[in-house]
Image (tube, helix red, strand yellow):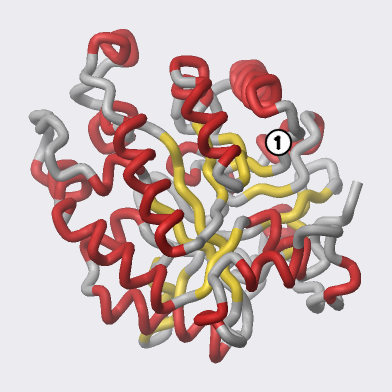
Amino acid sequence: MASQNPRARIAQPAPAPASQARPGEGASTATQSQGTAAGSKQVNAFSIDVEDYFQVAALAGAISRESWPDREYRVEANTERILKLLDETQVRGTFFVLGWVAEKSPSLVKRIAAAGHEIACHGHSHQLIYSQTPDVFREETTRAKRHLEDVIGQPVLGYRAASFSITKDSLWALETLIDLGFRYDSSIFPIAGHDRYGIPGASVEIGPVTAPSGRTIVEFPMSAAMFFGVQVPVSGGGYFRILPYWLTRTGLKQINEQAGRPFTFYLHPWEVDPGQPRVKVKAFSRFRHYTNLHKTEGRLRRVLGDFAFSTMRDVLTARGHLQAP
């Protein structure tokens, strides 16, 4: 359902023929990334938001940014664990890397890219966009994008906000993304009722989203499926851990088979790490962060077997939303 706010509206262009895909990318590459077992399955975007456990919004009330350098650093080992699983299943994905992590672990970023995955930007300090000034957001995003590009020697096309914090109150951030040369965003969650994110009524379709100036950028919205008239998030993350797997699978199949479009799936490296340090937080934050960590890797293996995946860039190119340079 389209939003009544024109600034949040996402258009719904028809899929383009495979001939418009970038050479070496697009439909053929995306299908091959899942192997022959994928058959004629819809190819979806697999993504990882590369941040450590101590940088998560749910724990922010108990962990200061100043303490980050002194915390046990686990993101490298956890990301390697995911890279190994993706190699085993022959899946390529998009890694939205936090600038803070990239500066601390440039070799990790290089290893992700060398394995054939797309590197995209997750900002620098994992702060909610609407809690930042436009100047600070521009400065941090510029810093993160430039550093990632320096490390991999390639343009970074995609962006995802910390905690999906592009909302009706922070649509101005789209202007900055366009100015900095991003080709697509994956931050808008078309749901209602969440305390940190969501644009109720925003389109669930992939397509251009309009910034306040009237300029556009391609949006690959986070995935939600309709259950009893309500948009239920099924993109991954905490929903993937907390909700039963059959519900996630049903919602994702609904998007692929009934709506006829790809979905985006995401996880964080800390979600495959049940041994991470326990931080003393309020009950709801503890529930959000720690529930079913021990089940995540097994569920991840299941979803990688049940659906076909590739990078976000490949999926967007195959559908005609990104053009060759």
- In the image, is residue 60 above or below residue 274? above
- Give the percent coordinates (x, y) of residue 220: 64, 59
Q: Is residue 58 left or right of residue 291?
A: right
Q: Quarter of the image containing the N terminus?
A: bottom right
* Badge 1 element: loop
In this view of the protein, which residue sits in the foreground, 51 or 105? Answer: 105
For label 1, the residue is 156
- In the image, is residue 303 above or below residue 50? below
In this view of the protein, which residue sits in the foreground, 204 or 71? Answer: 71
Q: In the displayed image of the protein, which residue is found farthest to the bottom?
A: 258
The residue depicted at 79 percent of the width and 38 percent of the height is 178
Number of marks in the image? 1
Q: Is residue 104 left or right of residue 33?
A: left
Residue 2's quadrant in the figure?
A: bottom right
- In the image, is residue 280 above or below residue 150? below
- Give the percent coordinates (x, y) of residue 107: 50, 23
- Give the percent coordinates (x, y) of residue 42: 60, 80
Residue 305's quadrant in the figure?
A: bottom left
Is residue 134 shown to the viewer in this render?
no
Instruction: Give the class, few, some or many, for how many residues have Cα within 10 Å of label 1's Cα (few <14, many ≥20).
Output: many
Q: Is residue 177 left or right of residue 87?
A: right
- In the image, is residue 54 above or below residue 201? above
Q: Is residue 115 left or right of residue 290?
A: right
Q: Amino acid at mark 1?
A: Val
In this view of the protein, which residue sits in the foreground, 4 or 139? Answer: 139
In this view of the protein, which residue sits in the foreground, 116 or 51? Answer: 116
The residue depicted at 55 percent of the width and 73 percent of the height is 35
- Give the percent coordinates (x, y) of residue 175: 76, 36
The residue depicted at 85 percent of the width and 46 percent of the height is 215
The residue depicted at 61 percent of the width and 87 percent of the height is 40
Is residue 197 shown to the viewer in this render?
yes
